[in-house]
Structure formats: C-alpha cells, structure tokens
Image (cartoon, coloured by chain):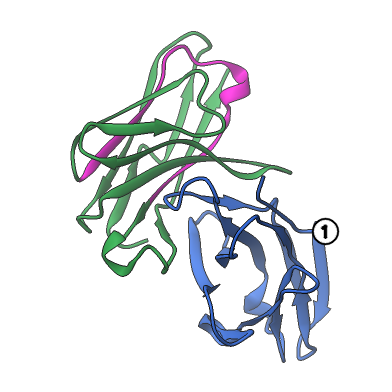
Chain colours: A blue, B green
Amino acid sequence: AQSVAQPEDQVNVAEGNPLTVKCTYSVSGNPYLFWYVQYPNRGLQFLLKYITGDNLVKGSYGFEAEFNKSQTSFHLKKPSALVSDSALYFCAVRDDSSASKIIFGSGTRLSIRP
Amino acid sequence: DAGITQSPRHKVTETGTPVTLRCHQTENHRYMYWYRQDPGHGLRLIHYSYGVKDTDKGEVSDGYSVSRSKTEDFLLTLESATSSQTSVYFCATRDEGQGGHYGYTFGSGTRLTVV
C-alpha cells in the first residue's frame, strides 16, 4: 500500500541558512507527490507538486522539492530560511487505489530562529 | 482558505450527543473531503464525496456519517460523540477540471472537544 514517511517531527534552522524537510514515499505505480504547509489555526495550503518531468519542482514562497526516484524521496528545500517559514509541513502522495484521494504524512514542524 | 467555509469554528459537546459540522464551498468543485487532524497522525480521511448524493468512506469512518444534498454543502455528523473524536476537523475540495493535479483547497478547520 502507498504511504509517505516524514522521519523528523521537528527541524530547527537559523534564519538565512538553507533548510531541508525530508519525505520518503512508497507507491506501486507512478508517484504523484505533494507538499502542503499549515500555519497556526489555519487549514493546509498547497505548496507544490510532482507529477512528471523535471526532478526539481519549484513552488510557492521560494520553496522547491527534489524528486529522487532511486531513493524514493521528495525532500522539501529552501536556499535561505525566513522566520515566517516556521510552520507545520506535510508531504502527501496520491492514493494508488483511488486518484480521488491523497494520503498525508504525519507532518514536520519547522522552526526558524532569528 | 477563500471559497471554503467551515462552521462552527469551535464546539464543545458532551459524550453521547450528535454533532453536525458543515462545510460550504463556493468553488463548484465536484470532490469534497472531511479529514481529522491529530498529533502524530497527520491528516486522516474520514469520508469524501464525488458528487451530490455520492459519498464513500475513508480510513477512519467509524462513528461518522456524511451527506451531500447540494454541490456546495458537505455535512459531517458524529452520530454519538465520544472523547476519541476530540480533534480538529478539516474540509477540503478538489477541482477536477484541472485534472486534480493542483492539490486540494482546505477550509480553516473546526476544533471539536467532546467532554
């Protein structure tokens, strides 16, 4: 069965440093992968997706994600972190059994210190 | 969160009482979803709908029912609330017209506490 794993509950980065939030996936077919961000007391917001094509996907707020098929990973990255990037980040994969559904990881809390 | 309204935003209810949460969208999206968010579990799908009167179960559907009598409204009912249903509930929609590849749009959530 398809799944996503976010191995880190929390990531701490200093402002201005690069950040990486890790995600690995398991699917039986072609992966459809997503990243979402959740700010306090808000719903999730779509950041970016990988369907096909270039392995480096660019999204909102300066974020990008690198798809690596051999490592079954889809890590979220940003070259220079901002304090305002502090939030909860979710990786997600489309359900193999139903294109109507996506499955979320458990989330990683990103904390950027000034 | 524009286009999706969840009500109420907060609710405290007693064990054993029925509770209905409402999701209203103005996007005319065909697909609508109810998720619950709990620490350490991320978001888990409760039920979803692929059209008026067309619904299906998600991974954590026990104790919940849904109804969709109009495109814009998707109701989630806890038939007899239990403390394990204390959670934050999110509604989401998907625009099938874009091939569903642009992800979901989420509401702001309903925080439900069952005492």
How far across and how far down the image is residue A50, in percent? Answer: 55, 74
Q: Which residue is mark 1?
A: A7
How far across and how far down the image is residue B76, in percent? Answer: 37, 30
Subunit under mark 1: A
Q: Nearer the viewer, residue B18 or B57?
A: B57
* Horizontal side, residue A11 vs residue B106: left or right: right
The C terminus of chain B lies in which quarter of the figure?
Answer: top right
- The type of residue carrying mark 1 is Pro
Q: Count the labels in the image.
A: 1
* Residue under the point 53% across and 82% down: A59
Name above or below for residue B98 compared with residue B94.
Answer: below
How far across and how far down the image is residue B88, in percent? Answer: 54, 39
Name above or below for residue A67 compared with residue A44.
Answer: below
* Residue under the point 19% across and 55% down: B28
Q: Nearer the viewer, residue A11 or A23?
A: A23
The N terminus of chain B lies in which quarter of the figure?
Answer: bottom left
Q: Nearer the viewer, residue B11 or A96?
A: A96
The magenta stretch spans which residues?
B72-92
How far across and how far down the image is residue B5, in percent? Answer: 31, 49
Secondary structure beneath disc 1? loop
Q: Residue furthest top?
A: B16
* Horizontal side, residue B64 vs residue A69: left or right: left
* Residue under the point 40% across and 43% down: B33
* Horizontal side, residue A27 vs residue A114: left or right: left
Name above or below for residue A102 compared with residue B82.
Answer: below
